[in-house]
Image: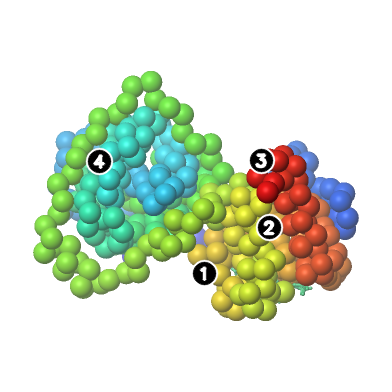
Amino acid sequence: MASRQGQAAQTAPAIGFRDSDHAAAIGAKPARGEPAQKRRDAQRCRRAGQFARRLSTGRAQSSQKSHGKPPMTTLVFVECRPSVGLAPESLAAIAAAGAFQQPIHAVIVGHHLAALSQQTANLAGVERVYCLDDAEYATPLAEPIAELLTELAGDYSHLVAAATRFGKNVMPRVAARLDVEPVAGVSHIVNHNTFERPVYAGRAVETVQSEQKKQVITLAISAATPPMQASQPAEIVALPSPQTAHRALSRLLSPSSPVNTAATASATPSLTAAKVVVAGGGAFQHPDEFERYLTPLASALQAGLGASRPAVAQGCCGSECLVGQTGHSIAPDLYIAVGISGAYQHLAGIQAAKTVIAINSDAQAPIFANADYGLVMDMTAALPAINQQLISKSLQDNPINNN
Ligand SMILES: Cc1cc2nc3c(=O)[nH]c(=O)nc-3n(C[C@H](O)[C@H](O)[C@H](O)COP(=O)(O)OP(=O)(O)OC[C@H]3O[C@@H](n4cnc5c(N)ncnc54)[C@H](O)[C@@H]3O)c2cc1C
């Protein structure tokens, strides 16, 4: 892959956005969380933990055909989800891609896309929407979509997708086909070829300067404001379906897991897009406990479900719920951690959470040093009481359902 210069100019120190300098609040008192304080923490972390590397040029010229587009245009892959529509993470990616200050073309793939492609065309900054609407793509697979994006890549300077499970499956394949090194998990776009992303479990921020001929990027900017509505809708270009034999071959050669439509089609918001996330940890020994105590809380708050590694290992939920270094990095307004100790590998995934509430029976659990509010209590007592309160409030607010 690319040769690197200026790598790791400074060793990353063990500094996080939430650290033990700030005592935990045990009880309903905010320990910290002033926006200004957070900004200071973030700046301090960046100053102390920032280092840089450069991805060099010297790539073989791509054999991709030009599609006659201006040289500096961004191509964004937009995910569609059954019963959700356009993935909120993709909308955030379009908004964030505006930082390149160049036209954005979007690619949308799936089935029955008339409304969704129109919705994409109405987003500010989007000047063209490529739409591949085919029953074969109702459950999209990474390989054919990577192939499609590679064929479209032409003169696009930036190829972007949200750093979702699926986006992270597609974009490295695109990068490999284009013979460039992908820049994964970008949290901030500095300029057209300079990006920031968290490294060392979120303890440092790496600045990557890429001088490659194309930037293939996954954006982990779930907190970005969704794009505005455009005054004029973009043009929609229908893409012809690739030949069936070609698709079948692509599946046969390297089949990847189909998108977990069971999870994405559920009524709960997806973990990376949810404003509120309720997460369970090692305290949950069995899936039944998760179902009994945590799922009602998530439903009552219309929250996404998250988990630490032990909860995933116990089969309480799928790995798509994992939060942390090897799972998702999320930025909800509210994160409720139940029976989670606060290991740094887990905390790496919630650096950008605005408010953290921890429920843990151990007052010494490290999670309290990283929480804005804490409740020292056994979850088997705390959660039913909280759920009962939420249900009562819901019944009061909606008396018509009270029968
Ligand atoms: C390379 C690497 C990568 C990793 N990546 C991740 C990652 O991405 N995400 C991740 O989560 N982990 C990750 N881990 C694992 C991580 O190190 C921790 O082991 C894990 O986060 C611990 O999860 P936990 O706190 O939920 O469980 P535990 O450590 O088992 O803690 C359970 C907590 O629940 C509390 N508790 C127990 N019973 C109750 C009760 N009845 N009521 C209330 N509280 C109770 C306990 O006091 C304790 O604090 C990684 C580890 C490695 C080595």
Label 4 belongs to which residue? Answer: 130
Give the spatial CA distance, label 2 vs label 1. 20 Å
Mark 4: which amino acid? Tyr
Residue 357 left/right relative to 28: left
- Residue found at x 57% / y 49%: 274
Mark 1: which amino acid? Ser
Label 3 belongs to which residue? Answer: 400
Give the spatial CA distance, label 4 vs label 3. 45 Å
* Rendering coords of residue 9 (x, y %): 56, 58
Instruction: Give the structural element (helix, strand or loop) at label 4.
Output: strand
- Residue found at x 74% / y 57%: 387
Instruction: Give the structural element (helix, strand or loop) at label 1.
Output: helix
Q: Are marks 1 and 3 in contact (CB under 8 Å)?
A: no
Give the spatial CA distance, label 4 vs label 2. 40 Å
Residue count near mark 2 (Cα–Cα under 10 Å), binned few <14, some 14–19, many ≥20:
many
User: Which mark is on residue 297?
Assistant: 2
Residue 271 left/right relative to 400: left
Q: Earlier in the sequence, mark 1 or mark 3?
A: 1
Q: Are marks 2 and 1 in contact (CB under 8 Å)?
A: no
